[in-house]
Image (tube, helix red, strand yellow):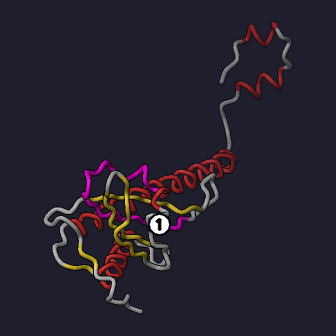
Amino acid sequence: MTIPARYCRMFNVPAPLVRFLRAETAAMSIEAAIMLPIMMIMYIGAFSYFDAYRREAVITKATYAIGDLLSREEGTVTAVDFEGLHDLYETITFSEGATRLRFSEIRRVSGSLEVVWSYGTDGSTQLTTATLGSVAAQVPTLLDNERIVVVESFNDYEPAFNVGLFARTQMRFVPTRQRYAARLDYDASVPAPS
């Protein structure tokens, strides 16, 4: 940065200060010592935000994939099947032990919604008709006696670095209509594997 001579004379700037301001020589180590921490902070921040967005995208796609698998099922499903889908979900999302899934079938009867059955993995609470109000706004419009299967995923997320992101539970709600059958048959008599 050079300062025109007329400004130096006009403001009566001392000669040593003018020489300092006009100098274009510098020590690379000092510049690096100033810029390296700034660059590292920017890199860590960018990494943390990219990781959070990547994780959001992965869990969204995995939840839709599990919902799509269930929509193609023509036979009877059991707790063993749901636990297997949960294992598949953890494999897809690379998140061992930090996830829970809840599978539910919802139908419309006489203008109101009702839960036909529900199953939660890893201690996830089951959805009931009484607790359906918390997610009713996310249920698509259904005809009378029409059914949908809902897959809900709950993922505990903790950012690698503290850059303004907070630990939270990422939730996804995916309603899916059956493709080849009118409803998904669930046999609750088969116990979950221990």
Q: Is residue 148 above or below residue 187?
A: above
Q: Nearer the viewer, residue 25 or 80?
A: 80
Query: Residue visible at 48% across and 56% down?
Result: 133
* Residue at the front extreme of this rendering: 110
Q: Is residue 132 visible?
A: yes
Locate the C terminus by quadrant: bottom left
Q: Nearer the viewer, residue 60 or 135?
A: 135
Residues shaded magenta: 135-157
* Residue at the bottom extreme of this rendering: 194
> In what element is the residue under mark 1?
strand
Image quadrant in which you'd find residue 82: bottom left
In the rendered image, residue 154 lying in the magenta stretch gets the answer yes
Is residue 2 shown left or right of residue 75? right
Q: Position of residue 64 (x, y in %)?
A: 31, 61
Q: Is residue 2 above or below residue 129?
A: above
Q: Number of numbered discs present?
A: 1
Q: Give neighbour class at mark 1: few <14, some 14-19, many 20+ (Cα, 10 Å).
A: some
Q: Which residue is mark 1?
A: 154
Q: Position of residue 154 (x, y in %)?
A: 47, 66
Is residue 155 shown left or right of residue 178? right
